[in-house]
Image: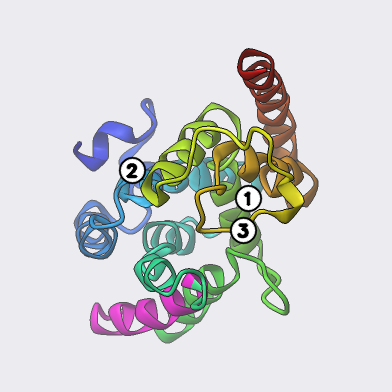
Amino acid sequence: MPFAAVMDQGLTDAERYPLGQAMTDRLVSIAADYCDAEGGCHGPDHSARVHRTALYLGRLMGARLDILSAAALLHDIGRRHETESRGAICHAGKGAELARKILTELGFAAEAIERIVHCIAAHRYRDASRPQSLEAQILYDADKLDSVGAIGIGRAFLFAGELGARLHNENSDISNTESYSVEDTAYREFKVKLCKVKDRMLTPEGRRLAEERHAFMEVFFERLEREIG
């Protein structure tokens, strides 16, 4: 699908392409080289949705849209390393390392590179990698919003399918199940991780949207439990 097809309608070219259309298309192409093989829940369509959401939040909050645009498009380029290591390598840290080289080769200013790299490194928000800048907070929220609601449910089932996990953890104690196993189902992802997303958002609009999407997930997984039971 062409990148423009998933962008908001009714916006000016400057709002659609804060880096200019040519550079945006270049970054989309570069990111696709890293993310195409991931497919499923971490393919280029995920980055396109995060980009769209990040720019929406950025416009509301007066953020640097050029920084957000580059960071959103490149934020998951380290994902393959995390997948192949079964979680031993953090894709955010690896992605930041890869992005620094890419952005340098493309001629981005040193100050912009540092801001973009921080956004990518902090978008997973683990340990000391708390998002410090407004743009990093927005990217974090945009990425998390793509993990909840109807989209989040769909991505959770896609990921479970990629792992070869079963449909549901019937007769299993979720607390005793492991990631990257047959028990790593969409339901487990919701109970272990996705149910907590709404409480970890960093921006006002991010929190509002996450609360709304969380409510839908509650209804869906309650229904799943009833049907299976």
**79 sits to left or right of 147:** left
Q: In which quarter of the view is residue 49 placed?
A: top left
Q: Earlier in the sequence, mark 1 or mark 3?
A: 1
Position in image of residue 143 (x %, y %):
54, 50
Does residue 140 appear in this view? Answer: yes
Q: What is the quadrant of the C terminus in the image?
A: top right
Residue 102 magenta-highlighted? yes
From this view, report whether residue 110 is shown above or below residue 147: below
Residue at which label 1 appears: 141
- Write the start and end of the magenta stretch as one range: 91-108
Asked if labels 3 and 1 touch by Cβ distance under 8 angstroms, the answer is no
Residue at which label 2 appears: 45
Q: How is the image coloured?
A: rainbow
> Circle 3: is it few (<14), some (14-19), or many (20+) Cα within 10 Å?
few
- Residue farthest to the right? 199
User: What residue sits 71% from the left and 20% below the top?
Assistant: 222
Real-space Cα separation, disc 3 to disc 2, in angstroms: 27 Å
Q: Nearer the viewer, residue 229 or 207?
A: 229
Q: Main secondary structure of the magenta part?
A: helix
Secondary structure found at label 1: helix
Position in image of residue 108 (x %, y %):
33, 78
